Amino acid sequence: DTAVSQTPKYLVTQMGNDKSIKCEQNLGHDTMYWYKQDSKKFLKIMFSYNNKELIINETVPNRFSPKSPDKAHLNLHINSLELGDSAVYFCASSQDGTGRGGYTFGSGTRLTVV
Amino acid sequence: EDQVTQSPEALRLQEGESSSLNCSYTVSGLRGLFWYRQDPGKGPEFLFTLYSAGEEKEKERLKATLTKKESFLHITAPKPEDSATYLCAGEPFNDYKLSFGAGTTVTVRA
């Protein structure tokens, strides 16, 4: 029973398209995140939601828009995809946003823009 | 800006050859220092959180320690299944996000 699940696992798309990545957690956690892992393996936070409320919004192009319909789901929509958006995107969750007990990550979505 | 630096970038070990990974951080008001393991094609898997200098935590062949400026992950008598990328991350008191290092990729040969 996967704790944090993301779909799709792989996404190949052309420049200019719009795509969405979905994330669901069944841990009962209050806080969810989107992280981006670039080709150099650095993980950088993009967004965080606590109980459906946006609490972290890093310097990310406004082509990226997160949506949290409820505290168990956090989706990421990307408009007008660019080559530089190619990366692995990870969803994560934590109990109360402080990370006690660790952040639980999904298995990632590898986005390739051609 | 919060920064986490890990060294070495890569570490090749013979099975049974113990070693240590280093994580130095400049995170203002560190709330916690996290260690994760990441296997190829998978998400980071939580290992430890350390909250104060002098704290140590152990799990099987791994032991993590924390000082005021850095953390070490000691791998004792590693086995091939310990091969992975080990990520270190700092969480500040005033923010709910992790600053990750680039990781150390450990390869253990039988």
Image (cartoon, rainbow, N blue to C red):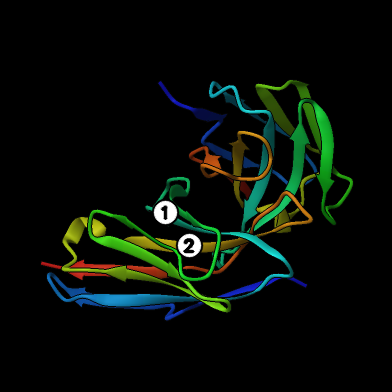
Q: Pointer 1 indicates a residue of which chain?
A: B
The residue sitting at 48% across, 62% down in the picture is B87
**Above or below A87: residue A27:** above
Q: Nearer the viewer, residue B61 or A86?
A: B61
Q: Nearer the viewer, residue A102 or B102?
A: A102
**Residue A45 x %, y %:** 70, 52
Q: Looking at the image, do the residues carrying marks 2 and 1 touch, with CB atoms under 8 Å apart?
A: yes
The furthest residue to the right: A62
Q: Which mark is residue A9?
A: none
First-in-chain label (2 vs 1)? 1
Say whether residue B53 is visible. yes
The residue sitting at 52% across, 39% down in the picture is A104
Q: Say which residue label 2 marks.
A: B87
Query: What is the three-letter code of the residue carrying label 1?
Result: Gln
**Residue B78 x %, y %:** 19, 65
Q: Count the marks: how many?
A: 2
Q: Pointer 2 indicates a residue of which chain?
A: B
- Are there few (<14), some (14-19), or many (20+) residues within 10 Å of tag 2? many
Horizontally, residue B55 falls left or right of residue B18, namely right
Q: Say which residue label 1 marks.
A: B38
Query: What is the three-letter code of the residue carrying label 2?
Result: Leu
Q: Nearer the viewer, residue A103 or A24?
A: A103
- Are there few (<14), some (14-19), or many (20+) residues within 10 Å of tag 1? some
SS type, badge 2? strand
